[in-house]
Image (cartoon, rainbow, N blue to C red):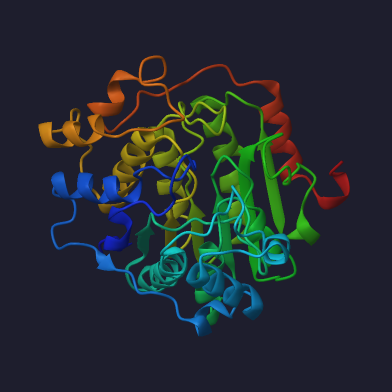
Amino acid sequence: MPARFISSEIYRATGYRGNHPLAIQRIGSVLTLAEQLGWLPGGYEDSYRASREDLLKFHAPDYIDAIVTCERERRVPEEVRERYKIGTLENPVFEGLYERASMSVGGSIQCAKLALESGVAYHPSGGTHHGMRDHASGFCFFNDPVFAMLTFLEEGLERVLYVDLDAHHGDGVEVAFADDPRVMTISMHEENRWPWTGTLGDRAGGRARNLPVPGRMNDSEFDYLMEHAVLPLARGFAPQAVVVTCGADPLAGDPLSSLELSNTALWDAVVALTRVAPHTAVLGGGGYNPWTVARCWTGLWGRLAGYAIPADLPAESRDLLEALDCDLVDDEDDMQPGWTTTLADPRNDGMIRERFREIAEAVLAPEEEVA
C-alpha cells in the first residue's frame, strides 16, 4: 500500500515566538511544497489530538497539568519553572502550546497505526525526542516518538526498533525504554553537543547503541556508519517495526550543528531503514534552517511515496523558499543557491576518518569489550 502522510493545519503557523530557534516556518513549508509538486493529491491524513488519557501513558499527571495551567494563566511561577523546566528561554510557554504538543503526540500515535496498515507512514510534525516523563527538555514538551513506540507495543509487537538520525542525542526515548527488553534504541548524533549524553559506551542497560560522531561528518562517513553499524544492528535485532526520527539538523548549513550531510544521504538512510521491518513510522525532529528543513522533509516524502525528485523547482515553490527568513542564518554569507531552486542537495562525499571505523567497531562489540 502507498505511504501515508500525517499532519495538521495547525502547523501552517509557527508556535514559538521571538528569536527562539523554532520560531521559523518548518512544517507549513513542507505541506505547501508537497502540494505544489502534486505529491498530496488526496490531501494528508489529518492528525488527531492526543487526549489526557493518551498522554498519561508516559507523562506524569502533575506535569501535564502544569503545562495546561501555565498556558491558561499566562504565567509560570518560579517553583513550577524549576520543577518542570517550562517557562524558560529554551522551553517557553506560549499560546497554543498544549494543543500543538498534544497534536504532535496524536499524530505519532496515528503514524504508528497507519504504518501497521500501509507499511510506511510519515509524520514530519513529530520527533520531539528530548521530552522527559516529568519535565520539558530541548524545545520538547511531550515525547511523541515514545508514543509511536508504545503504540506498536500495545498492538502486540514484541520487537520494536528506534533509530534517531537527529544531530542531537535521542535521550528522552533512550531513557523511556532503557528497561524494556522489547525495544532497542540507536542514536547517531554529534559528539560534544547538547544534551551532552549518548556517549559511545552508553548502552542503557544493554538495549541502546550510541554513535557520537565528530563534527563536519560528510556523506561518505555517514554512509559508512549506516552500512557497517546501524543497519547491521537493526537487522540483528530483527524488529517487527521501526520508528525513525529524521531531524534535518545534521544537514550542512544548520545553525545548531556542525555536521555536513546532504539531504540525499539522509533520504537514502531512511529508505534503507524502511526495509528492515514490515512497518516503519518516520518522524521529523530538529532542524533550524528553514530552507534545508523544508527541502529535506519534502524530498523525504517524495522518496517514501515513490515520486521522482525534480531537478528544479517550479516558480511558485522558488517564491515560497525565497520568502523564508531566519535570524540564525546569514542571508548573504550562509545562503546556498540550491536552497531556493532545488530539493536535492549534491552529495558531500569525502575521506572517511579513522574515528568512524572505530565507532562502528565499538557499537558492534560485545558489552564486555566496550570501554
Residue at horizontal 61%, vertical 64%? Answer: 76
Q: Disc count in the image?
A: 0
In the displayed structure image, the side of residue 225 where residue 319 appears, left or right: left
The image quarter in which residue 15 lies: bottom left
Give the answer, above or below, for where 130 lies relative to 60.
above
Q: Position of residue 62 (x, y in %)?
A: 65, 78
Image quadrant occupied by the N terminus: bottom left
Give the answer, above or below, for where 326 lies relative to 107.
above
The image quarter in which residue 259 lies: top right
Image quadrant occupied by the C terminus: top right
Give the answer, above or below, for where 132 lies relative to 169.
below
Most distant residue in the bottom direction: 53
Q: Mark yes or no: residue 204 visible.
A: yes
Query: Foreground residue, 14 or 320?
Result: 14
Q: Position of residue 301 (x, y in %)?
A: 30, 49
In the displayed structure image, the side of residue 265 where residue 231 appears, left or right: right
Residue at horizontal 57%, vertical 66%? Answer: 146
Query: Foreground residue, 130 or 344?
Result: 130
Q: Position of residue 35 (x, y in %)?
A: 17, 50
The image quarter in which residue 92 lies: bottom right
Q: Position of residue 264 (x, y in %)?
A: 38, 34
Q: Mark yes or no: residue 158 visible.
A: no
Residue at horizontal 29%, vertical 44%? Answer: 298
Query: Foreground residue, 354 or 61?
Result: 61
In the displayed structure image, the side of residue 143 where residue 306 appears, left or right: left
Residue at horizontal 40%, vertical 24%? Answer: 347
